Image (cartoon, rainbow, N blue to C red):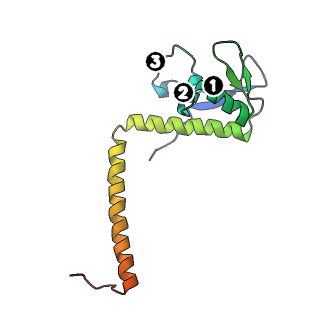
Amino acid sequence: MIGKKKDYFGLEESVYNPGYYIISILDYEGFHLNGTLGSYNVLFARLMNLSYAQFLRFCRDVCGAELFGKGTLYVIPMFSKKTLEVRELVKLLNNLANIIIWEREHPDWQEHQLELLDKEKKVYNILKENFNAIEKGNVGEQET
C-alpha cells in the first residue's frame, strides 16, 4: 500500500528540561501545514483520534510521561527515558502520519480497494469451486 516510509516525528531532548525527552515534529513541510493558531502537540492526539486530554493521559499512564506546564494553555508530556513504550508511540505516530499523507496523495485509493476486493471475491469463488470439485471427485470434468 504505502511506499517508502518517512519519519515525521522523533524524540529530542528538551531544551528547557535537560534529561527529559519530547516528541518533536521533524518535517513540518511534509504535512503541508501553513501554521497553527494553537499547539502542534495537538497533532499527535488527532493522529490517534484522541482528545488532547486523552493523549496526555495515555502518555502518562502507558508511556510513563511527566506532564509539564500544568495551569498553562498547553500541557506537554515529557519522558525521562526512551523506553520501549515511548519508542513504540513515536513509531505509531510515524505510521499513522505515513498513512494519512499517502491517502492525501492518492485520493482514489478507496476505489482501488473496492476493485481489489472484487477481484479477491472472484478468485475465492474460483478456488472454492475447484475445491468442491476435488472433494466430489469431479477433477478435470467439465460441467454442462
**Residue 47 % position (x, y):** 53, 32
Dot 3 corresponds to which residue? Answer: 34
Q: Which amino acid does label 2 sit on?
A: Asp
Q: Which residue is under mark 2?
A: 27
Residue 103: quarter of image: top left
Distance, label 3 to label 1, CA atoms, is 24 Å
Marks 2 and 3: which is nearer the front? 3
Q: Which residue is drawn at 58% across and 35% down?
A: 93
Alpha carbons under labels 1 and 2: distance apart = 24 Å
Which amino acid type is marked by label 3? Asn
Residue drawn at 72 percent across, 23 percent down: 67
Q: Which amino acid does label 1 sit on?
A: Ala
* Residue 53: mark: 1
Q: Neighbour class for label 2 at 10 Å: few (<14), some, many (≥20)? A: few
**Front in this rendered view, residue 132 or 44:** 132
Quadrant location of residue 45?
top right
Q: Where is residue 107 in the image (x, y as percent from the top left)?
A: 35, 37
Question: SS at mark 2?
Answer: loop
Kindly indicate whether the residue at mark 2 contacts the one at mark 1 (C-beta within 8 angstroms).
no
Q: Position of residue 133 (x, y in %)?
A: 35, 81
Q: Between label 3 and label 1, give the one nearer the viewer.
A: 1
**N-terminal of the two: label 2 or label 3?**
2
Residue 43, compared with residue 37, is above or below; it is below
Residue 42 position, x and y percent, is 57, 23
- Assign the C terminus to one quadrant of the image: bottom left
Q: For this view, does 43 lie left or right of residue 111?
A: right
Indicate the secondary structure of the residue bearing disc 1. Answer: helix
Q: How far apart are marks 2 and 3 (CA)?
A: 13 Å
Residue 83 vertical position relative to residue 72 in the rendered view, above or below? below
